Amino acid sequence: MKKLTRMKLINWHRFNNCTIDFGDSTLLSGENGAGKSTLLDAIQFVIICSTGYFNKAAHENGKRKLTGYIRCKTGKENQPYERTGEISAHVALEFYEESKDKYFIIGAVVDSASEGQETTVRYLMENTRLSDDLFLYGNQVKSIAEFRGSNIDIRQWCKTNVEARKMVTARLGRIEDKFFRLIPKALAFKPIDDIKDFVYSYVLDEKEVNIEVLRENVRTYQDMERTLDNVKKRMKKLEKIQELHQRLQERMERDQMYEYFLKRSDLDLVEGKIRSIDAAKKNEEVRLEQAKVQLEMLQKERAEKQEIATNLRVELRHNQEFVALEEEKKELERQLEKRRNALQDESELKKSVAKAAKDSERLLMGVKDAGGDSQELISCVREYRTQLQKLDSEANVAALKSLTDDVIHCKQKYFAGLQGELAKLQIQLKQNHAEREKLNKKISKLKRKKLTYPSGVELLTETIQEEFASLGREIQPGVLCEMLEIQDEEWRNAVEGYLNTQRFYVLVEPENFDIALGIYDRLRKEKKVYGVGLINTRDLENYDTAPAGTLASVVTSQNQYARQYSNMILGKVQMCERYEDLKKYPISITKGCMRYQNRVASAIKPEVFRVPFIGKNAFTVQLVQAEEEYQKMNELLENQEKQLAGMNEILGLLSTDSDVDIKYRLDVLHTLRTVDRAIAKCQENIQKLKENSTLIEKQIQLEELEKVLRGLDASVNSDTEKIGGIRTRIQDLITRKQAFLENEMTEKGKVFSLGEAAGDVLNSWNQEYEEALGKRPVEQFQNEYLGKRRNNSDRWEKIKDQMINAMVEYKTEHDFGAAASLEGFSEFQAVYDRLKNSELLDYEEKVQSARHAAETEFQEQFLAKLQENMKLAQGEFKELNKALKGIDFSSERYEFQFMPSKKYRSYYEMIMDDFNVIQGESLFSGMFHEAHKDVIEELFERLSVGGENSTQTLEEFTDYRTYMDYDIKIIHDDGTYSYYSKVCEEKSGGETQTPFYVTVAASFVQLYSNNIGGEAAGLVLFDEAFNNMDDERIGGVLEFLRRLPLQLIIAAPPDKIQYIGPAMDEIMLVMTDQKRSYVEEYHNAV
């Protein structure tokens, strides 16, 4: 064993120059504050190469520092340190190597130029023992440089803790780094409250399992699997598009068949029409021949009758009375025709008179209601109405014509005046409609909590926001009024009125002002944006506080820049309760908005502050105001539209069309009187001439003949017209047939084209057409198949929409550039073919490869390493229990227990399984997978998660200790037993300490036994040892410790000497006189 034999302390707290001897077991005893822990801290300062664990036994959160030890911290306010200036200190440990019978020194030299400025170097000296000349020049302590320069036996010189730790572990037997954790833990005793924490701290070391490769492999596998899933999802979406495209193609082919059926039926209809025309033409030709025969017979009979009538007329023409009678008859016919025309004019006159009278009545009422200068019109129209109502055939035409002229003049005059009023009203209506629309938009914006500002304000804020967004910066320009709040509503009008248009100034952060100003300048040039204020919020810090008594004091804002700006502007405006006080201040204002500035008093117009803009309630007030204005505007518009309708009605009644018509038709009254007299005279003369009997008989005979001739003429004319009609119909049939023949050629071309396009299915189409048509009318067939085609077209469009929607969804999700249309389908098809024939196979292969790599790493590096660590841990427990076997601790024996973790039992079973996967089975299949499927998947998921939040989880699942639970079995003298975890809260302090010392000692034995450098050290340090333990338990623990290959150094208070001392080889008393500390050997008087 490499034993610590002596320690040299120079300038270490109160130990100015002290050498302490150590035996195989040494007790350091002394009163509190004497320096027991100081000695142990010195030892661990050298061997664990750290200052982070000073005095941990006394205080869990001990704050002793190297500076305090080197400079001897006193804790006094006026003199915190005993040593000042430049100081050097030494801590050196002398070890004896029994197997080689030689000594070596491991030590540390510290130079401290000032408080907190320490430089530490550790060293190894071979074949050297402690002596003052190693560290001193007379009474002068050697510095680092002096120490190195004066000692040629220094084998290793370590300037860093890392180098020093390598030196310590190598020289003490090439022991594990666990040494550096166990030494502080042994010093910092804590009662065992949690067995698992205790095991983690004192029994089982943390053993790192490097899973970075595994994590990367798992991530790669999962990424590949996600990619493969993505490919499959894409294929599924594309297959849906394909299926819809197929259905669409079927509908399109069916549409082509229906189109062919309909075109064939159109051709059949045309051919049927041609056959019908041929039949009708033949019938008409038969009727034409029959009509010609009938006409010839009538014409022959008429010629015979005409000859007889001609002879009678010749005879009568030589009779004077007959000639006179014929002339009178002709005159009577002329007068009767004249009377018929006059009566027609009279009828039109009566209509115009009736309308004019009715319009006059309405006009009188309308003009009376309208008011205005209309007396002349009323008087004239009233007289006109009276004359029209009593108009008859005996009326004075000349007087009525004059009155009509007067009415036309009055109407035209009033019409011109009314048109001017109408134009004015229409302009007002247009303006009011526009104003109502503005109010409607304003209300809509206010309901969305948006105020309406001058157009330049909104354009500037929107443009600034858009321009900054294009630069990748999100800012929200504010309007000043939206950022302010008025705390005293009595002063609202004053604030609103004084700020006026300044309320609409635009505000941006100081760092954004220059860019915003550039944007404003460009808008000024390009879009003529003027008059909008852009606030420079830089350097407004002096306006953080609102001056008392000013308008600024009633205005606040959560935006510091808005608040500072309002303080700057309104902080100059003094509030005055009375107008008489205004002139006392350079700038002042009253609640009533009387303003005083530049030695001028002026009242702010109410229009300026009537509509509030400042504060969050401005929306509500403006909305109420706007809705009231909107209601008033609606009422005004309703009245104006009624007025407009009335004026338009009067304008219609002022029309002179009827009056002009009456004026020019009045002469018909005189004409009728004259014609009636002429008719009476003709009738009288005809009656006298008819009184001759001979003349009457010949006249009767002639009239009978003329009557017959008229009948024959009518028949001839009728038959002639009939023949003409027949010929016309025949020609029409010929023309129609020609048109149908041309149509037939067109339809045949269409049917042929569709048949060509149909290809191989044409025969089946023709067969289906014949079967579908059968013997029913073509029109019925067409109606049915037009309906079928429409229905098919609707389904076609629906399927097309579904396909396009599926295409759009695919494009959106996968950033695909093809057109979402029927024309773009080929590109979707090409992607599907590529995925199916290439990428799917490629990714399936990559997933298989990644999975194999992940499971191989999982098996060989993770599971195997965890199993190895867990089996080693179980071996350590067995060794520990072996050492404890047969040793009684106050009638109790201890045995450490380990078992699968209750929480992670399934993980434990998987890890400790015999790994069937090694026999060729995959982690993702076979018996091993079936047994541990859920655990494997969950563990894979946990191992692959990234980010800081997963670090703790990852550490937990890669720590082999996680998968086991631990306990201490307490075996009593009578053979019964209990478990520490269940009774620890009932145990006394001494009872909870025993397992601590036993476990720590066993851990050190294991540490030193596992060395790979031959002989190793056996040093163990205990501070404040065996506190609250009775003598029996102390004896049991010491018996156990003495049986172990360890060198014990125990620090305990004097009252423990009687219990600990007998088992120790050396007892050293640590004492102090408050200036310096020293150590003396204790000799038991007994």
Image (cartoon, rainbow, N blue to C red):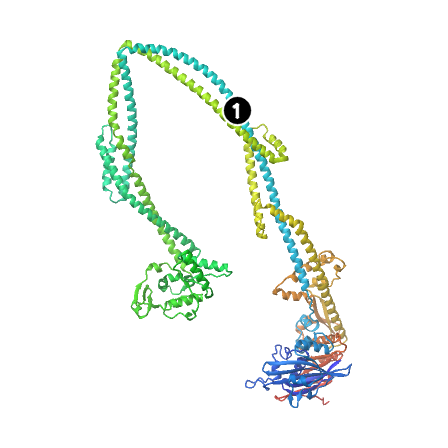
In the rendered view, tell whether residue 274 sits above or below residue 660: above
Based on the displayed image, in which of its 4 quarters is residue 19 positioned?
bottom right
Q: Give the number of callouts.
A: 1
> Measuring 42% from the left and 14% from the top, which residue is drawn there?
298
Depth check: 162 or 1012 in front? 162
In the rendered view, tell whether residue 215 sits above or below residue 193: above
Say whether residue 991 is left or right of residue 669.
right
Judged from this view, the residue extending furthest toward the front is 525
Q: Amino acid at mark 1?
A: Ser
How many other residues sit within 10 Å of disc 1, few (<14), some (14-19) or many (≥20)? Answer: few
Instruction: Estimate the x, y position of residue 385 in percent, counting from the top left.
Output: 25, 35
In the rendered view, tell whether residue 394 sits above or below residue 500: above
- Split into 4 quadrants, where in the image is the N terminus? bottom right
> Measuring 37% from the left and 49% from the top, which residue is drawn there?
433
- Split into 4 quadrants, where in the image is the C terminus? bottom right
Based on the displayed image, in which of its 4 quarters is residue 89 positioned?
bottom right
> Measuring 41% from the left and 12% from the top, which residue is drawn there?
300
Instruction: Estimate the x, y position of residue 42 in percent, counting from the top left.
Output: 66, 82
Depth check: 303 or 241 in front? 303
Depth check: 57 or 1018 in front? 1018
Depth check: 204 or 91 in front? 91
Disc 1 element? helix
Judge whether residue 125 can be spotted in this image.
Answer: yes
Based on the displayed image, in which of its 4 quarters is residue 153 positioned?
bottom right
Instruction: Write down the residue under mark 1.
Output: 276
Judge whether residue 1053 can be spotted in this image.
Answer: no
Instruction: Estimate the x, y position of residue 363 in percent, counting from the top left.
Output: 28, 39
Instruction: Estimate the x, y position of residue 1009 in percent, counting from the top left.
Output: 75, 75
